[in-house]
Amino acid sequence: MIRSYVLHIILITALIFGCDYLIGTYFSFRFEKNTCEHAGGDLNAFLKSDEVYDTLIIGSSRVNTMINPNLLGNKVTNLSKPAKHFYYSVSVADLLYQYRRLPKKTLIVNIELEDVFIETEERLIEDVCYLKYYYGKNDFITSTINERGIFERLKFIFSSYRFNGENFKLLTNPLQDICDKSENGFFPLIKGKNDKKRLKQGLLEMKKLHYTIENPHFDQNIIHLKKLCDKARIQLIFIHGPNYFIPEYMQKGDLIMDRICKKNGISFINFSKLYANEFHFEPLWYDHLHLNSDAANNYTLLVKEELKKLKKPATKYRGIIH
């Protein structure tokens, strides 16, 4: 009887892992074929592309809705993702370095100043989970995801685990022929009648936020990103976009970010501070965080002017160094 019980356990376990293997294999196939904006397809397409860019911008929706790369030059593109902040950006940069797909001259990374505080780190780590497909394939992504807890490694015993969440769109979206389209990674927000309402509601929520403790891991990840760019011999520039309202935590975050960048020889442009008066005007805003399409083009031109001041001669791209 015990032998029969053991055999049943072995058969059930084999069935579970067999089904998991088949599901994982199928989703891997769908992922590798995906080049749409959903489920990491835009990043997948970029990694496999032969297109060479001089400048690459990475950040959140405050980049892909507010910076138009077509106004910055011919060899500029945007690989930003809505609601994905600094740890995600570092992960993408590390992946690009691994695949020899960093730009030839300049990497621009958008920073949201709340990211420098320890209170937001859980969310920053969660952002990296969007890149679960590369768990075990990229050291930085793997180690960051493992910070979620001691059981995280065990979950990846199942190959299908890396396709949970949004990645199930790999199955549903092809059936519906859904594929988001952007203009070089730019999704402008068209001015509308509800903008003012969204702005006021968002400001009320923003004023409730309080961040106080500096995140020591933030500094470490900045240094990691700087080393990647130094190895590739490209320039690293951090930017923080404009804000209609600048709460106290942003002012403190600006001081922390400025200190870290000066210590490590990195350029940091805080448009929220440099152009505080220019953007404190309601008709420019789609909501409390995002400029509308007209204002976004004006902001992009300001970015272009500030980048000219930091322009450095490019050196030969060295790619991966072991």
Image: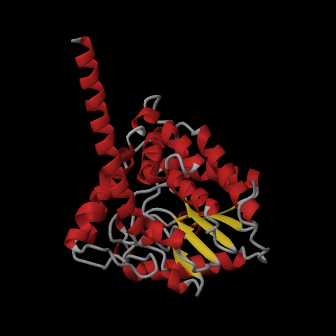
Residue 25 in view here: yes
Image quadrant where residue 32 sits: bottom left
In the displayed structure, 11 sits above or below 317; it is: above
Residue plotted at (23% across, 18% down) = 4
From the top left corner, tell me how far across and down residue 302 is, in percent: 57, 79
Which residue is at the front of the view, 58 or 297? 58
Q: How is the image coloured?
A: secondary structure
Q: Is residue 63 visible?
A: no
- The total of numbered circles placed on residues is 0
Residue at 52% from the left image edge and 67% from the top image edge: 276
* Residue ID at (26%, 70%): 174
Which residue is found at the position 24% from the left and 75% from the top? 177
Image position, residue 25 (x, y; %): 37, 54
Quadrant position of the N terminus in the picture = top left
In the rendered view, tell whether residue 49 sits above or below residue 11: below
Residue nearest the observer in this picture, 200 or 179: 179
- On screen, residue 316 versus residue 176, left or right, reads right
Can you give x and y, in whole percent of width and height, for residue 138 in the image? Answer: 57, 51
Q: Is residue 39 left or right of residue 94?
A: left
Residue 257, compared with residue 194, is above or below; it is above
Q: Is residue 40 left or right of residue 316?
A: left
Q: Position of residue 111 (x, y in %)?
A: 54, 58
Q: Residue furthest top?
A: 1
